Amino acid sequence: MEQKEFIQARVGILTISDTRDLDTDKSGQLLAEALAEAGHVVVQRMVVKDDDFLINEGLAGLKPQSDCVISNGGTGIAVRDVTFEALRDQVAQEIPGFGELFRMLSYKEIGTRAMLSRAFAGFTLDNVLLFVIPGSSNACGLAINQLIIPELPHFLAERRK
């Protein structure tokens, strides 16, 4: 197998929650710790309410300083979950395999409930890699350790060619 070149990413973390703040955001902290351990730089963590305007405002605040933004939370199908609708329009080039693999791996852990996740990834018009994942610590651990960290340098390298 070919050795991948390591590219250090500047990552913003956007937690979407009506009940958490920076101090109680265990999933955002888990993501930040995993990224730092892998050699990446977390430029900022932010928590916003599950509101389309606040979500887009948060993303807009993180993008200028980030190669990648990871949002967590609000990806389910509850009436209050608007993350998918708010962020989907920000994606110019989708990476369908991310959501497919995330749900496949989730299925192995939680069974058919995995189909309720609307996780996705893609590049925004201004070339920022965006991952949209559920907010549970288990889902964040799965996404960051099994999918995002292993391929993050490769994603960035492909966009710099």
Image (cartoon, rainbow, N blue to C red):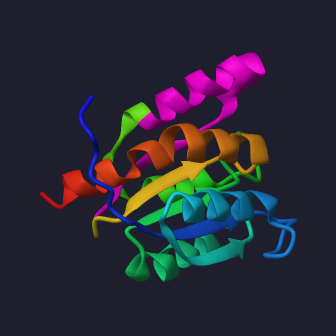
Q: Is residue 130 left or right of residue 4?
A: right
**Residue sitting at 42 percent across and 81 percent down?**
65
Q: Is residue 69 left or right of residue 67?
A: right
Q: Position of residue 150 (x, y in %)?
A: 44, 43
- Majority secondary structure of the magenta segment? helix
Which residue in the rendered view is the most extreme toward the left? 161
Q: Nearer the viewer, residue 160 or 104?
A: 160
Q: How many marks?
A: 0
**Residue sitting at 50 percent across and 78 percent down?**
62
Q: Which residues are magenta?
A: 98-125
Q: Quadrant of the N terminus?
A: top left
Quarter of the view holding residue 20: bottom right
**Residue sitting at 40 percent across and 52 percent down?**
152
Q: Is residue 46 above or below residue 74?
A: below
Quarter of the view holding residue 70: bottom right
Tell me, yes or no, whether the highlighted magenta stretch contains residue 6: no
Q: Is residue 52 visible?
A: no
Q: Position of residue 2 (x, y in %)?
A: 23, 34
Quarter of the view holding residue 30: bottom right
Q: Is residue 23 above or below residue 118?
A: below
Q: Position of residue 145 (x, y in %)?
A: 58, 43
Q: Nearer the viewer, residue 134 or 1?
A: 1
Q: Is residue 129 left or right of residue 147?
A: left
